[in-house]
Image (cartoon, grey):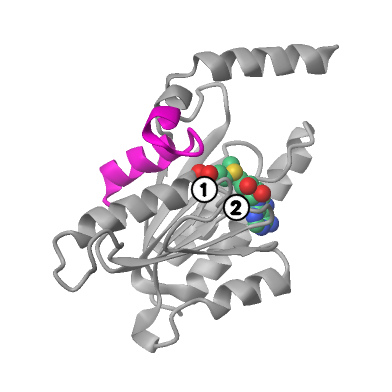
Amino acid sequence: MAKNKFNKSWLQDHLTDPYVKMAQKEGYRARAVYKLSEIDEQDHLIKAGMTIVDLGSAPGSWSQYVRNRLTELGKSNPKIESGKPDGQIIAIDILPMEDIADVSFIQGDFREEEGLAALEALLPKSAEGKVDLVLSDMAPNLSGVGVADSARMAFLAEIALDFATAHLKPEGALLIKCFNGSGYSQIVESFKKVFKTVASRKPKASRAKSSEIFLLGKNLKPPK
Ligand SMILES: C[S@@+](CC[C@H](N)C(=O)[O-])C[C@H]1O[C@@H](n2cnc3c(N)ncnc32)[C@H](O)[C@@H]1O
């Protein structure tokens, strides 16, 4: 009964949500795109020529947005073929994702060695060809038990941070989704050990009643 009530209220919110309508109109697969677009507009994350990794990419609206931005930026680079992005996009999700042109997608679990290795195999090989931006909208399947869900989310945040530490260029950035609950302050502390600047973002498209918050780290500190 309680579950039905929850589903009804979610459906009501979804049907009247302006971001859902806008996403449908603009051809994006999820309203989540407006969380990334707002943060990108504020923080100028996406720039021409970047290699960008999208963790937890399905159904694909963040990858679509990144592809659109890099294609827009490619218009002013005569070396880029018309309609092509000026940059590289690599995405991973446990779930399947319908193809997006110019996005290299791996279906795999980022927590598992196999998924991580498949992702790493797609990264640029040259020393100067490291990653510019790592995005993570990964979220666990919620159990409804706050402490357990926060712990799973914190684990995803930690492994995204490990990946970014290993693969980002010194001036690179990492944007991740977190829950502002138990474990959040530890994630912020971990970010502060790795990045010179750390900021939290709560974009308008992120529902006010959700504890979702995004953490942005920029410019790696030199390794000790
Ligand atoms: C909120 S959705 C992402 C939405 C996406 N940013 C978009 O704009 O379409 C979270 C995604 O994280 C994925 N995910 C969760 N844990 C993961 C893991 N360990 N490895 C890969 N993907 C994972 C889920 O399968 C889900 O598709």
67 on left or right of 71: right
Tell me: residue 28, above or below residue 68: above
Q: Is residue 179 above or below residue 53?
A: above
Q: Earlier in the sequence, mark 2 or mark 1?
A: 1
Residue at the spot 55% in from the left edge and 16% down from the top edge: 15
Whether ligand 1 has any atom under 8 Å from the Cβ at mark 2 is answered as: yes
Above/below status of 161 relative to 140: below
CA–CA distance in space, label 2 to label 1: 7 Å
* Residue where numbered disc 2 is placed: 97
Image x and y of residue 195, in percent:
41, 63
Residue 73 visible in rendering: yes
- Residue 201, given in percent of the width and then of the height, sits at 41, 39
The reply to whether the C-beta atoms of the residues labelled 2 and 1 are less than 8 Å apart is yes
* Foreground pick, 153 / 128: 128
Q: Nearer the viewer, residue 218 or 46?
A: 46
The kind of secondary structure element at disc 1 is: loop
* Residue at 57% over, 27% down: 210
